[in-house]
Amino acid sequence: MVPRCQIEVLYFAKSAEITGVRSETICVPQEIKAFQLWKELETLHPGKDVDEVEEKPKDIIQFTAEKLSVDEVSHLVISPLCGAVSLFVGTTRNNFEGKKVISLEYEAYLPMAENEIRKICSDIRQKWPVRHIAVFHRLGLVPVSEASTIIAVSSAHRAASLEAVSYAIDSLKAKVPIWKKEIYEESASSWKRNKECFWTADD
């Protein structure tokens, strides 16, 4: 018969979270080796490592006439697997070429706009290791200082999400069929194209 003894095992940090205890006394063979002890503990406390938690990546795309919330959009991409959430927030500014702007009005061809944004999300995933992507765009009137566009991306490390957000807004401006009208204080207004947009480029 193999001689056995009792030992006290102390758990800290992640191991304490997985086991749910800070210490316990277990009975093991007297000459047990470290790797064998580890196997014993895994048998006593079966469970997944935090890094193995399954979480499907999400692309969240929304066009809405409702006021956009930075907190709500950023919350949608937060993940326990990620240490970074990067944001772009486009807001209505109060001036354009010396004219006082009181609001913007946005219009979009939704089927094509949503499809183009999905392509942008796919491109991002091929270029950077990101987790979740959210692209929200407001339609209708957007008063000064309110958000018209919010893009949020989460990733394990900041570089990927920062680069992905920059790529997303540049691509949205160039490829997505969204039109903007500037409404001025003197009751005039003017539809504006995105200078980056490929189909409105001058010959």
Image: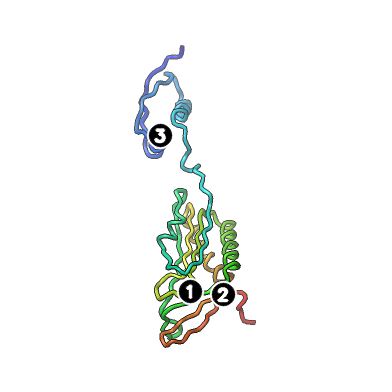
Q: Residue at x 42, y 77 (%)?
A: 93
Category of crowding for the residue at label 2, using alpha-carbon neighbours closer than 10 angstroms: few (below 14), some (14–19), many (at least 20): some
Residue 123 locus on image (x, y percent):
59, 60
28 in relation to 163, above or below: above
| Residue type (three-letter) at the residue carrying disc 1 | Gly
For mark 3, give the secondary structure: helix
Report the residue marked by disc 3.
19
- Mark 1 surroundings within 10 Å by alpha-carbon count, few (fewer than 14), some (14 through 19), many (20 or more): some
Give the left or right position of residue 174, taking residue 149 as reference.
Answer: right
- Of marks 2 and 1, which one's residue comes earlier in the chain? 1
Q: Spatial distance from mark 3 to mark 1, Cα to Cα?
A: 53 Å
Residue 134 left/right relative to 14? right
Q: Residues within 10 Å of mark 3 (few under 14, many from 20)?
A: some
Comparing 6 with 116, the one in front is 116
Question: Label 3 amino acid?
Answer: Thr
* Disc 1 target residue: 140
Locate residue 24: give its quadrant.
top left
Disc 2 residue type (three-letter): Glu
Residue at mark 2 to residue at mark 1: CA–CA distance: 22 Å
Point out which mark residue 196 bears: 2
Label 1: which secondary element: strand
Foreground mark, 3 or 2, reads: 3
Report the front residue among 167 and 54: 54
